Image (cartoon, grey):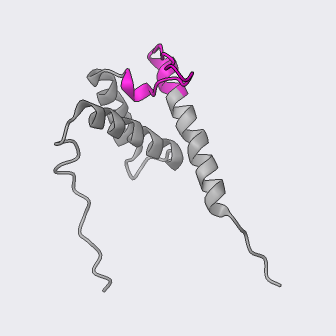
């Protein structure tokens, strides 16, 4: 019987969850943000209390560390992107992301 790994999607979900919590903690600590708890006892998402200037700084960090000559842990960059995206969604900014060049689609050839 050949070796096989099962449930790797659960590992991926766990790693992403840990990275997201770490990114929230890093942002909250760096900007000294105070997160309130809702009536169910859950802390609000850090994206709810960020300012535009803070989001721009985080976005610049993502861009800097996404450069081909830089390396950064991919889970954390993905989570930082998600936090920035959540902020723009909460602001109702429908133009965010418009004009981003995603490259040419792969035609399979």
The residue lying toward the viewer, choosing from 93 and 64, is: 93
**Residue 17 sits in quarter:** top right
Q: Is residue 54 visible?
A: yes
Please provide percent x and percent y for residue 87.
Answer: 32, 32
Q: Is residue 30 magenta?
A: yes
Going 52% across and 23% down the picture, which residue do you hit? 43
The residue lying toward the viewer, choosing from 95 and 40, is: 40
Please provide percent x and percent y for residue 63.
Answer: 34, 41
Q: Which residues are magenta?
A: 25-49
In the image, residue 34 sits, relative to residue 74, either above or below, namely: above
Q: How many marks?
A: 0
Please provide percent x and percent y for residue 37.
Answer: 51, 18
Q: In the rendered view of the protein, which quadrant contains the C terminus?
A: bottom left
Query: Which residue is farthest right?
Result: 1
Most common secondary structure along the magenta stretch: loop
Q: Is residue 103 left or right of residue 2?
A: left
Q: Is residue 59 left or right of residue 5?
A: left
Q: In the rendered view of the protein, which quadrant contains the N terminus?
A: bottom right
Please provide percent x and percent y for residue 101.
Answer: 22, 56
The residue lying toward the viewer, choosing from 65 and 53, is: 53
Going 39% across and 47% down the picture, which residue do you hit? 66
In the image, residue 93 sits, relative to residue 44, either above or below, namely: below
Q: Is residue 73 visible?
A: no
Going 59% across and 52% down the picture, which residue do you hit? 13
The residue lying toward the viewer, choosing from 8 and 90, is: 90
**Residue 62 sits in quarter:** top left
In the image, residue 92 sits, relative to residue 35, either above or below, namely: below
């Amino acid at each position: 019987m050949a070796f096989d790994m099962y449930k790797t999607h659960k590992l991926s979900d766990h790693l992403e969850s840990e990275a997201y919590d770490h990114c929230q903690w890093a942002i909250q600590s760096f900007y000294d943000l105070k997160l309130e708890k809702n009536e169910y006892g859950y802390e609000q998402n850090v994206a709810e209390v960020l300012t535009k200037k803070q989001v721009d700084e985080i976005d610049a960090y993502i861009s800097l560390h996404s450069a081909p000559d830089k390396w950064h842990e991919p889970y954390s960059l993905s989570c930082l992107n998600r936090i920035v995206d959540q902020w723009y969604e909460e602001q109702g900014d429908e133009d965010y992301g418009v004009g981003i060049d995603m490259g040419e689609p792969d035609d399979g050839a």
